[in-house]
Amino acid sequence: MKFIVSSSYLLKQLQVLGSVINSSNTLPILDNFLFDLDHKTLTVSASDLETTMSATLEIDSTSKGSVAVSAKLLLEILKTFPEQPLTFIIEENSTIEISSNSGKYALAYAPGEEFPKSVNLEEPSVTLVPADVLATAISKTIFAAGNDDLRPVMSGVFFQFSPQGLTFVATDAHKLVKYARTDVTASQVADFIMPKKPLTILKNILGAADAEVKIEYNDSNATFSFDNYVLMCRLIDGKYPNYEAVIPKENPNKLMIDRTQFLNSVRRVAIFSNKTTHQIRLKIAGAELNISAEDIDYSNKAEERLTCDYQGDDMQIGYNSRFLTEMLTNLQSDMIMLEMSLPNRAGILTPVDGLEDGETVTMLVMPVMLNN
């Protein structure tokens, strides 16, 4: 079994797949890449049992066969080569010989049969989503997903597909983000919860893709296929909370303000807030927004005044500055709207401009109790 491949081309593909491999695996075989050779096509796979990803490479070969090779060793050696063709020869004595312009290197391999087989989806539903739409949807929502192992359904992103459009939701009970598109639709109604890890991998590589992503899914697994990659993952089992019920419908108090100015103010004032609560206070009266924070233990306090466009009753409301900063950083618009009803009800943050047609972003941030 023998094949020839470009060193930088192979490295680029393996670095993407390497993000699937965990630093400590229960099965030693999972520390390897699976090389599956079929004449001019080489399929390389990596897995952690929950997520499996494979890339199809065009190479020069006439053989067939499959072997598992140490991922760490292979990545380390490939990083050191300048661009050149490498010849891989799989020997009978369980070693692979790699020949470069300057030398030869031998590393051990395991039989490819030992590598866990990926699941075949039985009659999956299929939806096509443009790569840039999916990348935006993931990056707009993933930061709001929770990390609580006791509530696994909240540790992922909720995908909702329907003929009316696509909706992506993430929440950790303190903040919630809903990203919706009406310009991309699915043929039938479906929903599933995607874990964070495969989404992070997708987010990192979808930016460069300009193709459509083919999403196939059933009750337990989902597959994302685009360019020369296929990513398959197990879905989070469970029922997603009814997020529509927590989004307040009546919000008479509307504050419109420059996003960058507001974000910079919140960042500065937050430095003086209590290190456990990260609490900042927004006091709005007329066209003036007063942002303040105080850490009584250390006698630190800060206060800033901004002009804003405000319609509604004078009010004071407290927020966790970290959540507010995360949300404001994640929006790209010049102006944002903060809609509120009462100091103990969630505030709704939306971009005023910079959205494409058919795109909506709704962010919800829970207030914190103010101690007057």
Image (cartoon, rainbow, N blue to C red):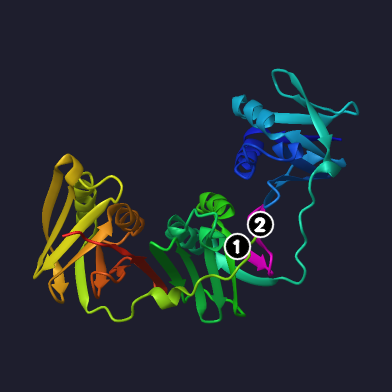
In this rendering, does residue 41 appear at all?
yes
In this rendering, does residue 84 appear at all?
no
The outermost residue toward the right is 92
* Dominant secondary structure, magenta: strand
**Side of 301 relative to 142 (left or right):** left
Q: Secondary structure at mark 1?
A: strand
Q: Amino acid at mark 1?
A: Val
At 63% from the left and 45% from the top, the residue drawn is 20
Identify whether 145 is placed above or below 33: below
Task: Estimate how packed mark 1 is, as few (under 14), some (14 to 19) or many (20 or more) residues with alpha carbons within 10 Å.
Answer: many
> What residue sits right under mark 1 in the picture?
213
Whole-number angstrom distance, CA of label 1 to CA of label 2: 15 Å
Residue 192 at x, y percent in the picture = 60, 68
Quadrant of the rendering where the C terminus is positioned: bottom left
**Side of 238 relative to 111 (left or right):** left
Quadrant of residue 260 within the rendered picture: bottom left
Quadrant of residue 326 within the rendered picture: bottom left
- Between 4 and 297, the one nearer to me in the picture: 297
At 64% from the left and 29% from the top, the residue drawn is 78
At 31% from the left and 47% from the top, the residue drawn is 276
Can residue 222 be found in the magenta stretch? yes
Name the mark nearer the viewer: 1 or 2: 2
Residue 77 at x, y percent in the picture = 65, 26
Q: Secondary structure at mark 2?
A: strand
Q: Which residues are magenta?
A: 211-232
> What residue sits right under mark 2 in the picture?
233
Residue 364 at x, y percent in the picture = 35, 67
At 60% from the left and 79% from the top, the residue drawn is 189
Residue 126 at x, y percent in the picture = 66, 71
The outermost residue toward the top is 103
